[in-house]
Amino acid sequence: MLTWNDVIKYTNNGNPAPDKRVEKTEDEWRRQLTPEQFQIARLKGTERAGTGEFCERHEPGLYGCVCCGTPLFDSRVKFESGTGWPSFTQPVKNNAIKYEKDSSYGMIRVEIMCNTCDAHQGHVFPDGPEPSGLRYCVNSASMQLLEEE
C-alpha cells in the first residue's frame, strides 16, 4: 500500500518504470480524444467540480486512462470525498501512476499522470481515509470505465 511518504519519494526521486510506454504526437492525441478530454488529459486542464461523468457513479470495475486504456484505479477504493471529483485511495499498481511536483496557481501540489502515456489525471493529497491516508482526486474526462473481461 502506497503512503504519502512513498508519493513524496517518487515525486522527488523519480517514478517507478511503467509496464509499457505509449507515445503519440499532439495531433494524434487530438484526433483520438474529444476537445474536453484533450484539454484535461494532454494540456493539464481541470473539469469544474461536480460536473464529471464519474462523480456519482459507483458500479464495479476498473477505471483506465482515457488516452491509452491502462488500468489506473479500482472502483473498490473509490470513495466520496465531498470535493466534486472522483476520489480513490490507491492506484491499481504502484507503477500505474506517475507523480510530479505542481507549483501552478500559487500552490504546491503533487500532480498524478498515467505512467504509460503521461496523461494528466489530477492530483493526490494526504487527506484521504485510512489506512493509506491518500486521496487521488481525478478528472472524469481523464478516465474511462473499462469493460469487465
Image (cartoon, rainbow, N blue to C red):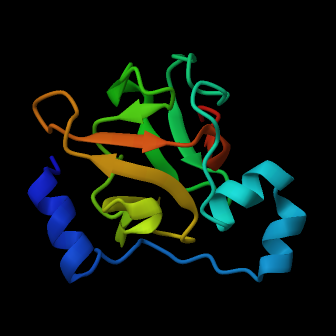
Q: Residue at position x 54%, y 78% from top?
A: 21
Q: Along the horizontal axis of the image, is 4 left or right of 42? A: left
Q: Give the residue displayed 38% in from the left and 19% down from the top.
A: 80
- Quadrant of the image occupied by residue 53: top right
Does residue 68 appear in this view?
no
Place of residue 63 in the rendered image (x, y in percent of width and height, measured from the top left): 53, 39
Horizontal and vertical percent position of residue 6: 14, 61
Taking 59 as reference, is 99 above or below it?
A: below
Where does the image place residue 54, in percent across and percent down from the top left? Answer: 60, 27
At 51% from the left edge and 16% from the top edge, which residue is drawn? 58
- What residue is drawn where x is 45% and y is 49%? 72
Please give left or right for residue 97 compared with residue 144 in the image.
left
Nearest the viewer among 112 and 50 is 50
Q: Residue furthest right?
A: 31
Classify residue 35 by image quadrant. Answer: bottom right
The quadrant of the image that shows the C terminus is top right
User: Residue 141: x and y, percent?
Assistant: 67, 43
Q: Is residue 143 above or below residue 107?
A: above
Name of the residue lying farthest toward the front: 106
Figure disc tally: 0
Residue 134 appears in view? yes
Front residue of 64 and 135: 135
